[in-house]
Amino acid sequence: MSALDKLPPAERDAAHAALRQVIGTAAIDAVTSVSGGATSAQLFRIDAHGENYLLRIEGMPSPLRNPFQYVSLRIAAEAGIAPRLHYVDEASRVAVMDFVQRQPLGRYPGGLPALAKALGELLARLQATPTFPAFVHYPDIVARLWAHVGRTGLFAPGVLERCNEQLARIRAAYAWDEANSVSSHNDSLPANILFDGNRLWMIDWESAYRTDPLVDLAIVGDSLARTLELESILHRAWLGRPLDEALRARLAHVRALTRLYYAGVLLSASATAPRTAPDTSLAAPTLAELAEATRGGLLKAGTPAAKHVLGKTFVASFLTEVATPGFDLSV
């Protein structure tokens, strides 16, 4: 029995229909469940007729689901930014693309400076593609997600008020002409940037739609360009020159929004776990304390407790502009 045979009947039938379209009657040599990216989709490596494919089956759509992800994926694949796309069925939410073997980003030749340069160039290429469909104004989706966190009862009344006030101030100050929106991945974490040993790809396009070009720049900067030198390399590779004062000011607003977005993602996940009482504090550990707790086993990655603490560190970054925890380069 292959991994596909364990799928629910509707997903299994959709998977086999997709593979028939791609490989025809060729025998499937191996089916392997794989992990990778920041996604809720089910992923399978399919080896057939000397070729390797990735079969992707989406999970349950969230309330923030982007209905245009496959349009964006197709544009990105045609531009050589996403792996080559062989098949998409939007109704069944199944796609087949080339399987690309991931190497750790930490092995990128030339180290972090070269990686920052390559990422800036990759974002510039993405933003030069035919424009993705519009979905939502970025500050609005951040506010919707943060409002959901407030409704979960995860925090005691009044605890989030400072965040709510800060978000309102940023939304009032943030200015962006939607007519200048560009194609954007909007979830450009290291987990969604794939290094094949030679070049970079971007994967997992669920959140991809047209928006402010600084959204991806802010996320990549917080993730991978965490010093002034690396930030300068990233910005110059993206824009062709250093950011001017006005662009830096707008980037500060966008960076705050991306930080609150990821705080919302993490805290929404932690809110699904049972709690004896609402949290009465937004106090978060320092980066050094967080690293020590992780090394010592006090926090186990992927658990609701770890997501809760990480979520509060992103809230701290949103409120005070201290550095975020960053992300693992071993992916």
Image (cartoon, helix red, strand yellow):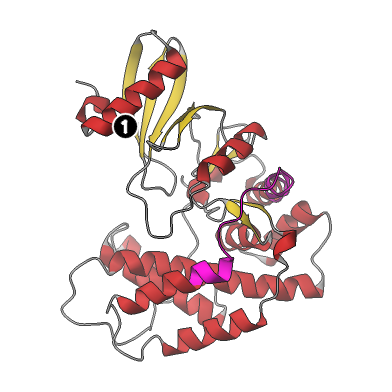
Q: Quadrant of the N terminus?
A: top left
Q: At which x and y percent is residue 328?
A: 46, 53
Image coords of residue 146 (percent x, y): 43, 74
Query: Amino acid under label 1?
Result: Ser
Residue pictured at 75% horizontal, 60% vertical: 180
**In magenta stretch: residue 122:** yes
- Vertical comparison of 174 with 101: above or below: below
**For residue 196, side relative to residue 152 (left or right):** right
Q: Quadrant of residue 134?
A: bottom right
Q: Residue furthest bottom?
A: 158
User: Which residue is drawn at the image coordinates 34% and 61% (left, top)?
Assistant: 295
- Depth order, front residue of 103/204: 204
> Secondary structure beneath disc 1?
strand
**Residue in front for this viewpoint, 43 or 177:** 177
In this picture, residue 307 sits left or right of residue 138? left
Does the image show residue 43?
yes
Number of marks: 1
Whether the magenta-drawn stretch holds residue 326 is answered as no
Q: Is residue 269 above or below residue 99?
A: below
Q: Looking at this view, is 267 or 236 the one in front?
A: 267
Say which residue label 1 marks.
33
Residue 233 image point, x, y percent:
74, 56
Q: Quadrant of residue 94?
A: top left
Magenta part of the chain: 120-142
Q: Is 90 rendered above or below residue 178?
A: above
- Residue sitting at 64 percent across and 39 percent down? 109
Residue 257 in picture, x, y percent from top left: 56, 71
Of all residues, the one furthest to the left in this rendering is: 276
Inspect this view and state whether residue 324 appears: no
Front residue of this view, candidates 285 and 19: 19
